Image (cartoon, grey):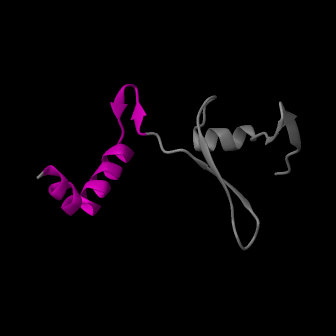
Amino acid sequence: MTRKIVQTGSSLAVTLPREVVEQLNLKKGDEVDVSVHPQTGAVIVRAGVRYFEGGRVTKHFKEASRRVLEKYDDAFRELAK
């Protein structure tokens, strides 16, 4: 898909095709992660991980929390002393 670079205020922007928006389940105001592949120069757009939906924590939040607690368990125990 070819897209045109457009001016929005003092920034440049690329619009996302409807198919991409639907596939990533994006909504106005959502955040995305944009990066450039170091070898190919490809622009990569990733949907932001949602940690809260409808006032509740998501599965992603629970998994991320578990990983942090496991990784830093010893440090947290030391801080709690």
Which region shows up in magenta? 51-80
| Quarter where residue 41 is shown | bottom right
Inspect the magenta stretch and tell me whether residue 62 lies in it: yes
Main secondary structure along the magenta-highlighted residues: helix
Q: Is residue 70 left or right of residue 6?
A: left
Residue 53, above or below 48: above
Q: Is residue 2 left or right of residue 79?
A: right
Please tell me whether residue 53 is drawn above or below residue 33 in the rendered image: above
Q: Residue at x 34, y 30 (%)?
A: 56
Residue 56: say if magenta: yes
User: Looking at the image, which residue sits at the far left?
Assistant: 81
Residue at 70% of width from left, 70% of height from top?
Answer: 38
Where is residue 17 drawn, in percent x and y?
A: 75, 41
Q: Say above or below: 5 vs 52.
A: below
Residue 44 x/y as whole percent: 68, 56
| Image quadrant assignment for residue 78 | bottom left
Query: Where is residue 1 drawn, in percent x and y?
Result: 81, 51
Residue at the (15%, 56%) spot, across then down: 77
Q: Position of residue 35 (x, y in %)?
A: 66, 57
Where residue 24 sits, quadrant-wise, is top right
- Residue at 38% from the left image edge and 47% from the top image edge: 60
Q: Specify the farthest residue to the top.
A: 55
Q: How many marks?
A: 0
Farthest residue in the bottom direction? 39
